């Protein structure tokens, strides 16, 4: 017989040149070798490196940043136009020409010279062979080799079956009839089932018990983790925010002011009140939020924040703790807090604040500790978690057009009254508040990617969106006046904002002011008509109330107009008005 050797797996003859790997050896700094003890290397003689592995490195092509040819001017340090307490849901405006980032799939970094594996999604370094990217069927070259391969493969398969059988038998033999887990389980069920007189309960009665009896109360917190960042324990009873107000009421808490229980809250609206603790002369500040699409009374909403003060607790003999009793209000100090939570995410004059996941974007998911200046003892604990529960049902949404929408009437002309709330857009005249459907019917479309006409808008809710038509863009605030949810397309526009740019035309106009006006002309118009205004030099903006006699007017009834005094131009115009909707 010749000295020719054959590979036991492939059946192919092994030649000297097959004993070496022609692919270059690429080492990843810091990488550890992947070794399986006892495993033999897999060699496919004569096989080529997978894909393009081992080829010349590919020079990376620099990616040009995407720029917006029509940028929208942004006011430096511009105050928010809308009332921060108005429960508006912020929506990022979509600027024509800009590339959206929301929902983008993260891109894996490209290693120069590496090829992407077809299925793995990770870069393949040249010189490495990845099984994930190998595909196809290999066939031996001659019948003799094929027969030898079948014999060897059959022997290996038989050996594997025998090994599996031995392991299964050995595992099965270790399982005894009186396994400790089985004993504990059986003992518990048998002993607990006995009645006081030693008799077994009637099995039929047990079967008749309803599933509802086996479930916790509808609003009881299930599986509260007392070590959670938002959990707290009061006299041995643990709570975790957010938690239904009804749960507190069922456990002996009451509203300090009974009238607060019936306060009607719109969608995402919040109120601050106090709850008395179980008949004691102690009440604690809480915030209550409505997650529902429809208006709800405070007693039917959720507690999202609670605050405890050591003096109140001490006077009433109440103990409040967190983290399984490791931190106690009125006893623990800052070192006790940092020992558990680590360094604070924010610190101000000894007050320590921690954000959920240590992310300062989670400003509504926090825990704050304040300490007594003289003793260093924990004086105040505030826990806030406004995150909506995952299984919360927001309720039904009606597709009917609310009655108030049909009360709108178009003005006959733009007129010359700067304080009328009239505006002209696309050659048509409107008056705020105006139904969104009016603009949709006139050719405008919703340009916000996360809002559509059939999206819900909750009771008393406000949503900011972008509208576009041809090359024009405007930004509007939508409002649902009703106590029930409706569709976005059935809501009212109560605010409109236009940003003026040389890169984008806009024909927006109000009586006495247009996008073509200069700052000096605008000021002259105000002075000539005797219109009261407030001008902020540091921000270069005018604030003008549509009702000059109302000193308490908020941001929902007037103009905010930004200018560039050096260039003598108008940069943006915002008009807000609820008008008859508030009647």
Image (tube, rainbow, N blue to C red):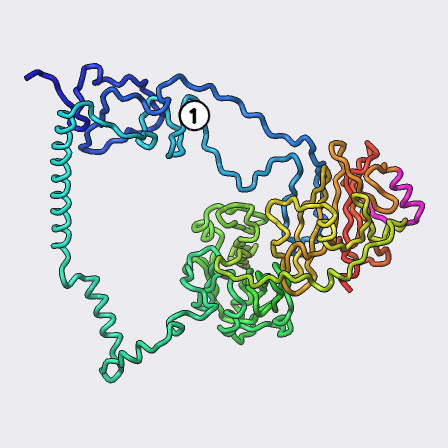
- Position of residue 518 relative to residue 198, above or below, is above
Left or right: where 455 falls relative to 25? right
Residue at x 46% of width, y 47% of height = 342
Query: Can residue 488 be seen?
Result: yes
Q: Work out which quarter of the rendered image holds the C terminus and state it.
A: bottom right
> In percent of the image, x 49 and y 38: which residue is there?
105
| For residue 378, side relative to residue 569 (left or right) | left
Crowding at dot 1, Cα within 10 Å, few <14 / some 14-19 / many 20+, comes out as some
Residue 186 x %, y % = 21, 68
Q: Where is residue 111 in the image (x, y as percent from the top left)?
A: 43, 25
- Range of residues picked out in magenta: 521-538
524 relative position to 360: left or right: right
- Asked if the magenta segment contains residue 450, the reply would be no
Who's the residue at 12% across and 28% down the image? 148
Where is residue 457, by image quadrant?
Answer: bottom right
Nearer to me, 472 or 263: 472
Q: In this view, does 174 lie above or below 151?
A: below
Q: Which residue is drawn at 61% across and 69% down?
A: 297
Instruction: Decide if residue 321 is on the left or right side of residue 346.
Output: left
Residue 527 belongs to the span the image colors magenta:
yes
Q: Place residue 262 in its image quadrant.
A: bottom right
**Residue reaching furthest to the front:** 143
Name the foreground residue: 395 vs 308.
Answer: 395
Query: Which SS class for mark 1?
Result: loop
Spot the residue most to the right: 528
Q: Residue furthest bottom?
A: 197
Measuring from the top left, give residue 85's x and y in whole percent: 67, 56
Q: Can you say which quadrant of the picture contains the N terminus?
A: top left
- In the picture of the structure, the residue carrying the numbered disc 1 is 111
């Amino acid at each position: 017989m010749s000295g020719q050797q054959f590979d036991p797996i492939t059946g192919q003859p092994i030649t000297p040149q097959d004993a070496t790997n022609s692919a270059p050896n690429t080492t990843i700094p810091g990488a550890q070798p992947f070794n399986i003890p006892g495993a033999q290397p897999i060699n496919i003689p004569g096989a080529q490196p997978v894909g393009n592995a081992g080829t010349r490195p590919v020079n990376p092509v620099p990616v040009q940043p995407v720029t917006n040819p029509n940028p929208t001017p942004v006011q430096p340090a511009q105050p928010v136009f809308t009332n921060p307490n108005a429960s508006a849901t912020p929506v990022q405006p979509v600027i024509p020409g800009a590339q959206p980032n929301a929902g983008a799939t993260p891109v894996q970094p490209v290693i120069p010279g590496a090829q992407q594996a077809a299925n793995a999604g990770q870069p393949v370094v040249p010189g490495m062979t990845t099984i994930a990217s190998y595909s196809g069927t290999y066939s031996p070259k001659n019948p003799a080799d094929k027969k030898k391969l079948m014999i060897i493969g059959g022997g290996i398969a038989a050996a594997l079956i025998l090994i599996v059988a031995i392991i299964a038998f050995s595992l099965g033999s270790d399982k005894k009839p009186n396994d400790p887990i089985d004993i504990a389980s059986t003992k518990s069920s048998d002993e607990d089932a006995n009645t006081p007189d030693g008799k077994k309960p009637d099995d039929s009665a047990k079967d008749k018990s309803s599933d509802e009896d086996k479930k916790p109360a509808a609003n009881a917190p299930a599986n509260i983790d007392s070590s959670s960042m938002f959990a707290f324990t009061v006299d041995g009873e643990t709570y975790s925010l957010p938690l239904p107000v009804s749960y507190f009421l069922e456990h002996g808490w009451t509203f300090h002011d009974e009238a607060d229980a019936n306060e009607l809250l719109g969608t995402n609206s919040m109120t601050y009140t106090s709850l008395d603790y179980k008949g004691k002369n102690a009440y604690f500040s809480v915030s209550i939020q409505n997650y529902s699409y429809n208006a709800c009374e405070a007693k039917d909403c959720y507690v999202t924040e609670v605050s405890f003060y050591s003096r109140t607790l001490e006077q009433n003999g109440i103990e409040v703790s967190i983290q399984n009793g490791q931190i106690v209000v009125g006893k623990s100090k800052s070192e006790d807090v940092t020992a558990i939570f680590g360094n604070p995410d924010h610190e101000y004059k000894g007050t320590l604040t921690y954000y959920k996941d240590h992310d300062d974007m989670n400003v509504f998911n926090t825990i704050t500790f304040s300490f007594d200046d003289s003793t260093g003892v924990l004086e105040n604990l505030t826990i806030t978690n406004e995150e909506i529960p995952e299984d919360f049902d927001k309720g039904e949404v009606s597709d009917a057009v609310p009655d108030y929408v049909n009360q709108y009437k178009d003005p006959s002309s733009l007129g010359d009254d700067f304080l009328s709330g009239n505006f002209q857009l696309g050659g048509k005249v409107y008056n705020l508040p105006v139904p969104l459907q009016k603009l949709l019917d006139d050719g405008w479309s919703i340009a916000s990617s996360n809002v559509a006409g059939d999206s819900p808008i909750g009771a008393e809710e406000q949503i900011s969106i972008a509208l576009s038509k041809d090359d024009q863009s405007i930004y509007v605030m939508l409002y649902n006046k009703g106590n029930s949810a409706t569709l976005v397309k059935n809501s009212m526009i109560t605010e409109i904002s236009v940003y003026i740019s040389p890169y984008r035309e806009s024909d927006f106009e109000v009586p006495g002011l247009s996008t073509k006006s200069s700052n000096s002309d605008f000021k002259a118009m105000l002075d000539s008509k005797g219109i009261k205004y407030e001008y902020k030099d540091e921000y270069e903006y005018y604030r003008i109330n549509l009702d000059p006699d109302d000193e308490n007017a908020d941001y929902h009834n007037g103009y905010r107009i930004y200018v560039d005094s050096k260039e003598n131009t108008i940069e943006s115009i915002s008009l807000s008005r609820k008008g008859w909707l508030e009647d």
